[in-house]
Image (cartoon, rainbow, N blue to C red):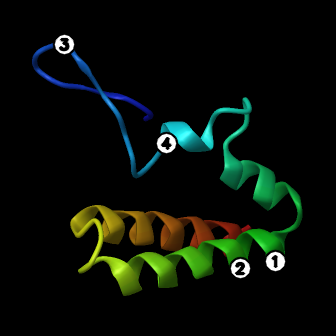
Amino acid sequence: MGFNKVETNEIKKDNVNHPDHYQQSGIETIDYIESLGKEVGEGFCIGNVIKYVSRYKKKNGIEDLKKAKWYLERAISVMEQ
């Protein structure tokens, strides 16, 4: 995961799965938030699902829907643990 190689051997940023701005402190923000407790992590994920689904038409389109999907899958994973 993380970066995807494109045919020109350039590195493409992955704004859905591992955005650079969420990894600057050595730990991804989602990992830190989930370390505060299962309910905190679950609530954060569901809140982000709502945020990205509600704004996708006016902001980043399909990228926001992919982010909503990512957070929904993460919330499901946390709840299944």
Q: CA distance from mark 4 to mark 1?
A: 22 Å
Which numbered disc flags the more N-terminal residue, 4 or 1? Answer: 4
Question: Which residue is the site of mark 1?
Answer: 39
What SS does tag 4 mark? loop
Outermost residue on the left side: it is 7
Q: Point out residue 3 in the picture as x, y percentages from the top left corner.
A: 38, 29
Q: Point out residue 60 in the picture as x, y percentages from the top left corner.
A: 28, 65
Residue 43, which numbered label? Answer: 2
Q: CA distance from mark 1 to mark 2?
A: 6 Å
What SS does tag 2 mark? helix
Q: CA distance from mark 1 to mark 3?
A: 41 Å
Question: Which residue is the site of mark 3?
Answer: 9
Q: In the rendered structure, which amino acid carries the disc numbered 4?
A: His
Q: Residue at x 17, y 24 (%)?
A: 6
Q: Quadrant of the image for the C terminus?
A: bottom right
Q: Residue at x 50, y 85 (%)?
A: 50
Q: In the rendered structure, which amino acid carries the disc numbered 2?
A: Gly
Q: In the rendered structure, which amino acid carries the disc numbered 3?
A: Asn
What SS does tag 3 mark? loop
Q: Point out residue 2 in the picture as x, y percentages from the top left corner.
A: 44, 33
Say if mark 1 contacts mark 2, CB within 8 Å: yes
Which numbered disc flags the more N-terminal residue, 1 or 3? Answer: 3
Q: Is residue 23 left or right of residue 13?
A: right
What SS does tag 1 mark? helix
Q: In the rendered structure, which amino acid carries the disc numbered 1?
A: Glu
Q: CA distance from mark 4 to mark 2?
A: 20 Å
Question: Which residue is the site of mark 4?
Answer: 18
